[in-house]
Image (spheres, rainbow, N blue to C red):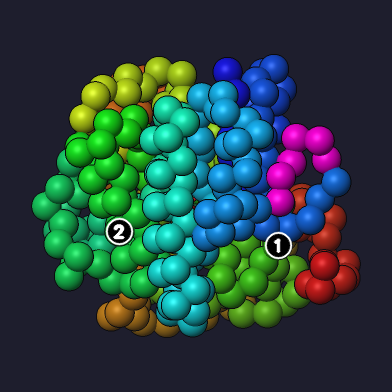
Amino acid sequence: MKILITGALGFIGQNLYNFLTKKGIKVIALDLHIRDSEDYIRADITEFYDLWKVFKENPDIDFIIHLAGEVGRILGEEYPHKMVYVNAIGTINIIKLALEYRSKLIYFSTSEIYGRKFDEKMVSENDALDISPFMLTNIYSISKFFGEVLVNHYVENYGLKAVCIRPFMIYGPGVFPNKYKSAIDQFIYNALKNKPLIVHENSLRAWCYIDDFIEGVYLVLTKHEFKEGLFEAYNIGTQEYIYTKDLAIKILNILNKPLDLIKIVQMPTKFVSKEKRFSIDKILSLGYKPKVSIDQGLLKVIEWHKSINNSDEWKIQ
Ligand SMILES: NC(=O)c1ccc[n+]([C@@H]2O[C@H](COP(=O)([O-])OP(=O)(O)OC[C@H]3O[C@@H](n4cnc5c(N)ncnc54)[C@H](O)[C@@H]3O)[C@@H](O)[C@H]2O)c1
């Protein structure tokens, strides 16, 4: 089996690359940055020629795992042109080559595509069929939803074989914190620096440790049946729901920091959902068993943050 991972230098990409290569699977890693490694190709997914060369030299790619893109709610609001362009044009380029070279496509979407549906119910995969683009709450979700719609179009009308993964709150060591990253990364960084932890009142999430998530992706890769003309999706996450305030308390307690570093602010009425409740029944049916509790996962991430936190040198790397 030969797999192309786009966005292979990102958080999920690096973990997935390590996991798959350890299993002896041949992986080609693709990303924007310059690296000197045999199985790495520098390419921009918005440049069709870059991608065309990858496939010309590797016409036997069985799967494309398409992670590359502009990622995050705040990033999209600050750089909407870039996000819409990269996530839409990059995806259409990948689709065209997947069709030409008969590669199966695993498209990475996001939990954000459920938008205002989260206000109504615990969402499951098919709820996406009832979502109007007018229910989406940010540019990131709009760009990823559009990607799903594009993939669906080519599955239904052109014979593309594809499946979609919707990750929910993935965390783990290795994410350099900044305002575009998750609450966990920001909270740990701020706690270590004795800076306030800004908590959205009543915000509720279920966090998924990266190793569990990667096992879920592997199940989709190995067990999903790519049926002709049918585009399906999998939610991947855990059901260990926690209020963001309690998450902040856990982090401060582990680090022996005062709880008054927590600053509660009202939930914004725009861009973000208060609660994200979702079903994982579909991925469970493939044998998914998340193992790492939030308490265990936080310890691992905190350990990693401590290892980089003595200086901020990484900020300009
Ligand atoms: N991490 C999460 O919790 C989460 C949640 C929901 C969805 N996702 C999705 O999973 C995927 C991977 O997320 P991540 O957390 O690893 O993000 P990341 O930002 O760490 O990685 C994205 C990678 O894509 C690369 N990239 C960006 N533009 C590119 C371009 N034009 N050409 C080639 N490469 C490009 C970046 O250099 C980066 O290495 C994304 O599609 C994201 O939308 C992630």
Residue 162 in sight from this viewpoint: yes
| Relative to 267, residue 230 above or below | above
Specify the segment rendered in magenta: 37-42
Q: Is residue 195 left or right of residue 274?
A: right
Amino acid carrying label 1: it is Phe
Does 38 appear in magenta?
yes
Label 2: how many Cα within 10 Å (few below 14, some 14–19, many 20+) = some
Q: Are marks 2 and 1 in contact (CB under 8 Å)?
A: no
Does 206 appear in magenta?
no
Mark 1, secondary structure of its residue: loop
Distance in Å between CA atoms under marks 2 and 1:
28 Å
Which residue is found at the position 68% from the left and 79% from the top?
Answer: 195
| Relative to 167, residue 234 above or below | above
Mark 2, secondary structure of its residue: helix
Whichever of callouts 2 and 1 sits on the residue coming sooner in the sequence is 2
Residue 173 in sight from this viewpoint: no
Amino acid carrying label 2: it is Phe
**Circle 1 residue:** 176
Q: Is residue 71 left or right of residue 281?
A: right
Instruction: Name the quadrant containing residue 264.
Output: bottom left
Instruction: Name the quadrant containing residue 292.
Output: top right
Image quarter (top left, top right, bottom left or bottom right) of the C terminus: bottom right
| Relative to 192, residue 247 above or below | above
Of residues 227 and 255, which is closer to you in this image?
Answer: 227
Label 1: how many Cα within 10 Å (few below 14, some 14–19, many 20+) = some
**Circle 2 residue:** 146
Which residue is found at the position 64% from the left and 71% from the top?
Answer: 178
Which residue is found at the position 75% from the left and 35% from the top?
Answer: 39
